[in-house]
Image (cartoon, rainbow, N blue to C red):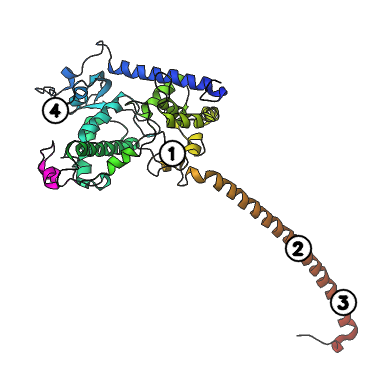
Amino acid sequence: MEDIPFCEQNVGNIEELQLVRDDVNEQENDETNVEEDHVSLTDILLEDDVVEPSPKPNETESQQKEESLLIKVKDTSTGEIIIGKMVVNQVWHLEKTKKIMVEIGANGQGNDNGSNLLVRFLGELAKKSAFCPISVERWDQMSEKNSKAIWNCIKDHFVYDYVAGIKWTWEILGERWKAYKYKLRCKYFYPNKSKEDLLAIDPPVPENDWIAFKLSEQNMKNRKMLKVSHAGGSMSNARRARHMELQLNRYVCRVEVILSTLLKKNGNYVNEEGKSIAEKISENLSQDQERVATEGVPSKINAYPDDVIGKVYEVEHSGRVCGLGVGVFPTSVFKTRKYFMQFDSVGSSSQKNVEELQKEVHTLKEKLNGYEEIKEQLSQTQDQLKVILNFMQRKFGDELPTFN
């Protein structure tokens, strides 16, 4: 019997997602290899007498051949918007009035080429010790002075909804900074070298920053814990979802985004673990698609606490939401601090509590009705006693005994 990875009713959906995935990848290539009919930004945007930096000798071939991106640049003094190609090295030399435009989606993540260039820029910014010293042990311990300098540098070169995108920007920069530290460890730290030998190495960072650098193996351990690979490439899930939304002309859910990254270009799964997860989440794919069609929000990876991803992956990490990428948190997406794993149990226990309360209310109502009947009977008896008392007073007068 033929091995069919998904249930029969979902085959059409998966094929559709695979076609969209290929279109998205082709579109990304088209955007980076755009024809020369668009103006180059090098001549008209860069400051006078500034020459684009030449590749450094120690740069890799991939770094030297960085593909340019088709982006929008806004002149903040005139409001004029120019469309052209740019690479990350050119960002540093833009005129002060020129800023690269970035589109922020409903999840607070960048989803256009401008955001792609911003991510590359953040990767370079993370390597500069003047802004992001590697001597800081943890990203959340970065000094206020450095944080302000970083944010001012970003605002000097990019323009977007800063309030909506600040969490995403900061998370991306933190991830790039940690990745850079990990790269330095892999390149310069050897188990058979002493601490003195390590400190004597001449790395591409200031001496003081290098000496204070903490020798940690935690990042290496974290990398080894990764169970499921993906075929999403360098495109973020936010940008991928935006392309899928435009291609399909409808809202998309995080199940579709994750599925599209588990399939290779040839239709195979990335690995057995990826295949197992794809089979599980595909079973209820149509239900999530129907829900998004009625409740979905444009320019957003739509996610719900009780969707199929929540059931398969169970409890969410407190600092991220599965499938939504960096800078998105469960509290902002689901508006609650209670996460998925307890969703069904909480719902059933709440229903039980409601039923018990309803029974108690019914019992109290019955008791209250009985109390009202007794109250009415007492009132009637009291009236009868008044009539008898009046009769006795008229008949016996002062001879009638009194009661205190």
Q: Quadrant of residue 43?
A: top left
Q: Residue 354 location in percent, x, y?
A: 62, 51
Badge 4 local density, few (<14 within 10 Å), some, or many (20+)?
few
Amino acid type shown at disc 1? Val
C-alpha separation, residue under disc 1 versus residue under disc 2: 51 Å
In the image, residue 356 sits, relative to residue 302, either above or below, namely below
Amino acid type shown at disc 3? Ile
C-alpha separation, residue under disc 3 versus residue under disc 4: 116 Å
Q: Which residue is mark 3?
A: 388
Q: Residue 394 location in percent, x, y?
A: 88, 81
Q: Which residue is mark 2?
A: 372
Amino acid type shown at disc 4? Asn
SS category of the residue bearing label 4: loop
In the image, 39: left or right of 343? left
Magenta stretch in the rendered image: 195-213
Nearer mark to the viewer, of 1 and 2: 1
Which of the labelled discs sits on residue 58, or is there none?
Answer: 4
Q: Which residue is mark 1?
A: 333
C-alpha separation, residue under disc 1 versus residue under disc 3: 75 Å
Sequence-first disc among 1 and 2: 1
Q: Quadrant of residue 132?
A: top left
SS category of the residue bearing label 2: helix
